[in-house]
Amino acid sequence: MVFSSHLFVYYFLPLALAVYYLLPHRGRHAALTTLSYVFYGWANPAFMGLMLASTVVDYLCGRGIATGGGRGGEPIPRLAPGGPRSRRQRLFVAVSVVTNLSLLGFFKYFNFVVDNYNALLSALGLGTLEADSVLRIVLPLGISFYTFQSMSYTIDVYRGNAGALSNFVDFACYVSLFPQLVAGPIIRFSEIEEQLRGRSHTIQKFARGVAFLSVGLAKKVLLANPCGKVADTVFDAASVIPMDAWFGTLAYAFQIYFDFSGYSDMAIGLGLMLGFVFPKNFDSPYRAESITDFWRRWHISLSRWLRDYLYRPLGGNRRGRRRTYVNLGLVMLLGGLWHGAAWNFIAWGGFHGLLLALERLRGRRSLFDPLPVALQRGGTFFLVLLSWVFFRADSLGRAFQRFAEMAGLARSAPAAPLVGGVVYEPYYLLTVMAAAGIAWLAPQTWNWTRRLSAWKAATCAALFAVSLVILDTQEFNPFIYFIF
C-alpha cells in the first residue's frame, strides 16, 4: 500500500484516524500496531512475520540489556552513559545487531551474492560448480528501514541514551508505525522515546500534519511522477543523444528528490496527525555548497544513523588522517550497498566517499572554494547529478554507457533522436522547469508549515484536490525507496 493511492487516501487513512481517536488512550498503541501490520502486510502477509520476529528479538534484548524496574508497565531505569557493561549486556546487544544484520543481509543480498559467485565461476571456466539459482529471495518492503530503526533501540539502551520499554505493545508500535515504516524517515528510539510514553494531540499539530500531507502528495503526484516518466524513457532507451542523456539525468535528479522528500513530508504529516513529531529528513539538498553539506541535507535520518552507529564507532576522524579517509570511504560504500544489492549502488557510494575525502583533503569547505556561493552550489549539484547516473542505471555497464553518451563519446543508433519527441513535450518541459524552481527557490515544507494562515490552508486544499484528480489519470506511480 502506498500513500499516493485511492486505497490509502479514501479508505485506510480515514479508518485509521477514526479508530485511533475513538479509542481510549490506553488502547491507541495496540490499535496503531494492528493497523500498521495491516498496512505493511497488504501486499504480502508473509512480510509481517519477519517484522514481528525482529521486533520480538530486539524487545527481549532491550530488556536483557536493562537492569531493574519495569514491572507493571513502569519505566525501566536507563543505564549510565559511558558506564561499564557486563558480559551479559554485551551479549544481548550483539544478538540484536547480528540478528538484524543477518535478516537484512540474507533477504537483501542473497541473490546478489549468488549471481556474482556464478558469474565469477563462469568467467573462470568452472560453470559446473555454479550454485543452483532456482531459489530467488523476495525482498521484503522496508526491511532496510525497520531493521536499522529497531537496531537503534538496543544500541541506544546499551549506550544509556534511552531507557528500555517494559511494554511490548509500545515497542511494537514504535517499530511498525505505518507513517514511516516502509520508506523512512529512520526514527531512532531516543528521538521518540518520550512520545511513546506520552504526547499531545492538538488542532494546530493536526492541521500542520494535513499541510505536510498535502504538500508531500503534490510533490509526488505533480512533480516526481512526470519527471520519472522522462527519466524512465531516457534510461530505458538502448541509445540516446547527449542532450537527451543530460535531460533524462536531470529529470531523474528531480524525480528522486521530490519522490523521496514528498514521501517524507507525508510521513511527517501523518505522524503529526497521530500526535508524533518526527525529525526533518530533507533540508533543500540541491542548494548544498559542498558534498559534505549535501549529506547534511539529504536523507538526514540515514546520514545521522551512519554517522552515529557506524562512522564514529569506527573511529571517525579521531585516529589520524589516513584512518579518517578509510572510515569515510567504508561508510559511504556501505551506504551505497544499503540502498541496493548491485555494483552500481556500490559505485554511487564510493563516488560520494571519494568526493567527501577530497573535500577533507583540501581542507576547504567545498571543492569549488573560493568561487561565489551560486557557483559552489552549481558545481556541487553537477557532481550530485553525475552520481545519480550510477543510482538510476540498471547496471554498472549501463551507467558507463550513459556517461559516454553524456560526453558525446558514444555512437548513437539511428533511432536515438526519436526519444526527444517524447521527453520534450511541453507538459514534461514545464514540469522539469517547475521542479527546478521549487528545488532551488521555494521554502522548505518544514518551515512553510510552521505557521498556517488562511491562504496557506487554501493552497494546501487546492494542492490536495488537484493531486487526487491527477492521480486518477496516472498509471505511473512508484515510490523509488520502496525497493530499498
Image: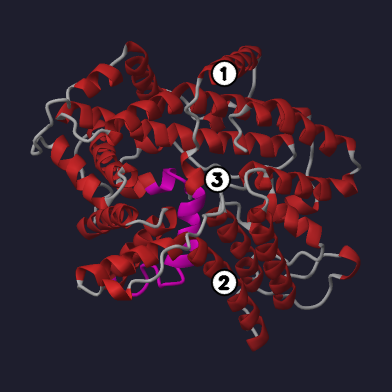
Q: Which residues are magenta?
A: 295-320
Q: Secondary structure at mark 3?
A: loop
Crowd class of label 2 (few under 14; some 14 to 19; many from 20; radius 10 Å): many
Q: Nearer the viewer, mark 1 or mark 2?
A: 1
- Tell me if residue 316 is in the magenta stretch: yes
* Disc with the residue nearer the chain's start (2 vs 3): 2
Q: Residue at x 56, y 60 (%)?
A: 148
| SS for dot 2 | helix
Q: Earlier in the sequence, mark 1 or mark 2?
A: 2
The alpha-carbon separation of the residues under discs 1 and 2 comes to 43 Å
Question: Is 126 situated above or below 365?
Answer: below
For disc 3, the neighbor class at 10 Å (few under 14, some 14 to 19, many from 20) is many
**Vertical order, 100 against 4 (above or below):** below
Magenta span has 46? Answer: no
Mark 1, residue position: 472
Q: Is residue 18 visible?
A: yes
Q: Position of residue 483 (x, y in %)?
A: 48, 47
The N terminus, quarter of image: top right
Q: CA distance from mark 3 to mark 1?
A: 23 Å
* Residue highlighted by disc 3: 183
Q: Which callout, 3 or 1, points at the residue further toward the start of the chain?
A: 3
* Amino acid type, label 3: Ala
